[in-house]
Image: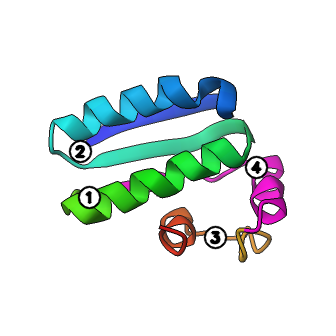
């Protein structure tokens, strides 16, 4: 399984760069772990990228792990963006959250 650590911003300004890293990892046909533990800022483009990654992994039967936890600011943004359940941050299962929207 390929582990990709995403730090700092997961926003529109970095979405293309991060997507390239994800596509490269998925191109190997192995599983992927996205470590979101040091993501400080996330916007709707970042959430869309995570949902698309989960969906693609499921369609291709490739294991996908989202590890964290997300910062409290990022969890707040998830709730603001309409990801229901995001405000219940204690023990938040990120994969389950984003799989619901995939």
Measured in 3D between alpha carbons, the distance from the residue under mark 1 to the one under mark 3, in whole angstroms, is 21 Å
Instruction: Choose between 83 and 67: the one closer to the eye.
Output: 83
43 vs 92, left or right, is right
* Mark identifier at residue 63: 1
Q: Relative to 40, say whether 77 is above or below.
A: below
Residue at 71% across / 76% down in the picture? 85
Q: Relative to 80, say whether 41 is above or below.
A: above
Measured in 3D between alpha carbons, the distance from the residue under mark 1 to the one under mark 4, in whole angstroms, is 24 Å
Measured in 3D between alpha carbons, the distance from the residue under mark 2 to the one under mark 4, in whole angstroms, is 25 Å
Question: For mark 3, does the 10 Å Cα neighbourhood hold few (<14), some (14 to 19), or many (20 or more) residues?
Answer: few
Question: For mark 1, does the 10 Å Cα neighbourhood hold few (<14), some (14 to 19), or many (20 or more) residues?
Answer: some
40 vs 73, left or right, is left
| x then y, percent, for residue 36 | 57, 43
Measured in 3D between alpha carbons, the distance from the residue under mark 3 to the one under mark 2, in whole angstroms, is 23 Å
Residue at 51% across / 27% down in the picture? 16
Residue wearing tag 3? 91
* Residues at discs 2 and 4 in contact (Cβ within 8 Å): no
Q: Is residue 20 magenta?
A: no
């Amino acid at each position: 399984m390929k582990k990709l650590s995403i730090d700092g911003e997961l926003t529109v300004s970095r979405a293309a760069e991060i997507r390239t890293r994800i596509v490269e990892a998925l191109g190997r046909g192995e599983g992927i772990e996205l470590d979101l533990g040091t993501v400080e800022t996330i916007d709707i483009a970042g959430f869309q990228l995570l949902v698309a990654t989960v969906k693609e992994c499921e369609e291709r039967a490739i294991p996908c792990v989202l590890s964290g936890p997300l910062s409290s600011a990022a969890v707040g943004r998830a709730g603001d963006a309409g990801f229901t359940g995001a405000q219940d941050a204690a023990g938040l299962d990120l994969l389950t959250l984003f799989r619901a929207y995939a």
